[in-house]
Amino acid sequence: MLLAMLVIWQFRTQEQMRKWLPSSNVDELATLLKSQEDTQKRLESEILTLRNQLHNYDRDSELERMRAVAGLTALEGPGVEVLLDDKKDIAHDEEPIFFIVHYDQLEGVVNELFAAGAEALEINGERVVTTTGFSCVGTTILVDTKRMAPPYIIRAIGDPQTLENAILIRGGYVEQQILQWGLEFQVKRVENQKIHAYRGSLNFDYARVVGGGQ
């Protein structure tokens, strides 16, 4: 009985609409409603597509940023170029071992630049990253496993004035540990320079990612 009443009510409503509106207007209204429904579906589909594209863009951008921070991509920008070399004129009564660049002196200059805000750094074309180690074999300096010989060209990206002022500060590391031994040291500002990508291994044998990223 309820179903019959609903059918009758719907039939009467349609009849009233036909009386109130010409048949042509009813058809036009139906066509308009159908067009609006199609437009709404199309817009919803476009919004979904744009949201997916934005999500992928954010994910790709974050991944690229993380690769840059890890040193896996080449970077360019302003900064400084530092030259560090052995002392040129060593007197006969001077012990040569005290007037050549040692690995800890090279590492000290690198640390000073990072502490001053260097965002990327390389030595003789080799990128320095968080896992980079400094050591020596005889008079040869090892940066990771790369054998290096003087002169050492250190390129750092960052604010040129800040980096230069920090590295040349009076009483700082360079003055006390580099210049007092007569080692050759030069620093110049650079408007733009390229820092190469890290080409070594970043494998972890013992470290594991903590669940949940905490």
Image: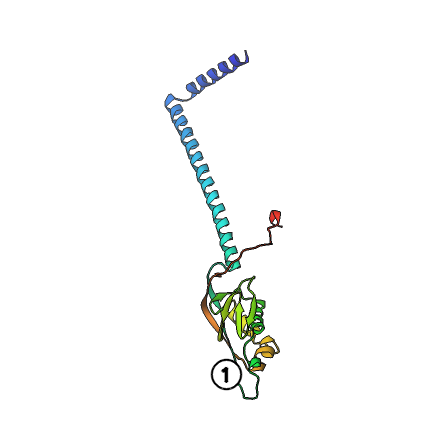
Q: Residue 166 at what x, y percent from top left? A: 57, 73
Q: Residue at x 48, y 66 (%)?
A: 126
Q: Residue 65 at what x, y percent from top left? A: 51, 56
Single out the residue that lies furthest toward the left.
24
Q: Is residue 155 visible?
A: no
Q: Is residue 4 above or below residue 20?
A: above
Single out the residue that lies furthest toward the top.
1
Could you say which is closer to the camera, residue 161 or residue 144?
144
Q: Is residue 78 above or below residue 13?
A: below
Q: Residue at x 53, y 75 (%)?
A: 139
Q: Residue at x 50, y 49 (%)?
A: 59
Could you say which is closer to the camera, residue 208 or residue 56?
208
Q: Is residue 183 above or below residue 29?
A: below
Q: Quadrant of the N terminus?
A: top right
Mark 1 packing: few (<14 Cα in 10 Å), some, or many (20+)? few
Could you say which is closer to the camera, residue 190 or residue 44?
190
Q: Is residue 171 visible?
A: yes
Single out the residue that lies furthest toward the front.
138
Q: Please tell me whether mark 1 sits on a helix, a strand or a loop.
A: loop
Q: Is residue 205 above or below residue 109?
A: above
Q: Residue 208 at what x, y percent from top left? A: 60, 51
Q: Residue 133 at what x, y percent from top left? A: 56, 65
Question: Colour mode?
Answer: rainbow
The amino acid type of the residue labelled 1 equals: Lys
Q: Which residue is mark 1?
A: 88
Could you say which is closer to the camera, residue 9 or residue 173?
173
